[in-house]
Amino acid sequence: MRGQGHQTFVDELARFAAGQVDPRLAAIAQRTAAPLRVVVGGRRGVGCRTVRRALDGAGRAAGIAVVDPKADGEADVVVHVLAEVVKPEDTQAIGQAAAAGRPVLAVLNKADLAGSLSGRGDGPAAAARARCTELSARVGVPMEPMTGLLALTALDDLDSTLWTALSALAADPGATACFEGSFAGFLAADVPVPPDVRHRLLETLDLFGTALAVAAFRQGRTPAQVLTLLHRMSGVDG
């Protein structure tokens, strides 16, 4: 959404306004420097709380402030969260926000579920982008893919048990096949990580994030580099 280029512009505008006598310039500079206020909404079960936390954590450095849904009238932009499909209540909510004159950005959360990890057909990233193009035309607003769980993991880090589990999976050549099927297949696979720890990996990273982290470890990346990769692949930066 916003980035370093925006901040550079804000700083230059503030310096310019400070040297002028016209109070209107100072007012413009102040408005431009204010955080972009975003409200996150969507139907139950699509991951609104996850997206809200992810945007709140990652957005501060980019000049984005997530406001309470109860104060959505104060927001500059509405982020409407979807998962997999568009339902009538999504179309209605997006239409109401647009009719009120506020920009709306739709977010396809759980974007990692859109594709396959088997290597057959589009992978999650390509499939999610294609799905966003399709659903964006249906709801009439821009749509971006996001995997909120990965964004939160990149912010919160993993504990030592999960890092050890990822390292063990990366060291096991036979573990590759367990990422090609379902959650149940991953939990039942014959790999050197206890099922309860694998269940925690799915809760924290989902299957795509776990596979991504394991692949990164196999490439020799450090935990810090894995977190950076998870952040980038989450789509939280747009």
Image: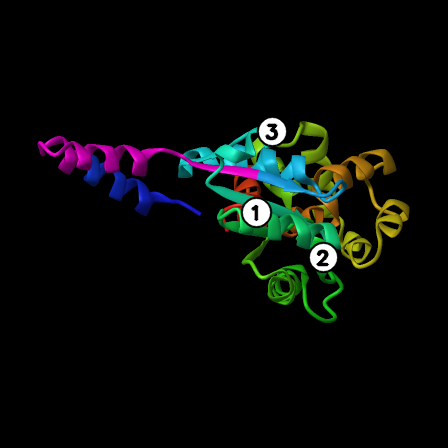
In this rendering, the answer to whether 158 lies above or below 176 is: above
Check disc 1 and report its element: helix, strand or loop. helix
**In terms of sequence position, does the residue under pointer 3 or pointer 2 come before the other?**
3
**Overall secondary structure of the magenta stretch?**
helix
Relative horizontal placement of residue 150, taking residue 59 as reference (left or right): right
Residue in view at x 87 percent, y 38 percent: 195
Q: Amino acid at mark 3?
A: Lys
Q: Which residue is mark 1?
A: 97
Check disc 2 and report its element: helix, strand or loop. loop
Q: Nearer the viewer, residue 61 or 69?
A: 69
Q: Which residue is mark 2?
A: 86
- Residue at the far bottom in the pictured view: 121
Q: Which residue is mark 3?
A: 70
Q: Nearer the viewer, residue 9 or 219?
A: 9
Q: Residues within 10 Å of mark 3 (few under 14, many from 20)?
A: few
Q: Which segment is the magenta one?
A: 15-39
**In terms of sequence position, does the residue under pointer 2 or pointer 1 come before the other?**
2
Q: Nearer the viewer, residue 123 or 75?
A: 75
Task: Estimate the x, y position of residue 84 in percent, counting from the top left.
Answer: 73, 56
In this rendering, the answer to whether 226 lies above or below 142 is: above
Tell whether position 143 is magenta: no
Q: Amino acid at mark 2?
A: Val
Task: Estimate the x, y position of residue 78 in percent, counting from the top left.
Answer: 54, 44
Task: Estimate the x, y position of residue 33 in percent, counting from the top left.
Answer: 31, 35
Measured in 3D between alpha carbons, the distance from the residue under mark 3 to the one under mark 2, in whole angstroms, is 23 Å
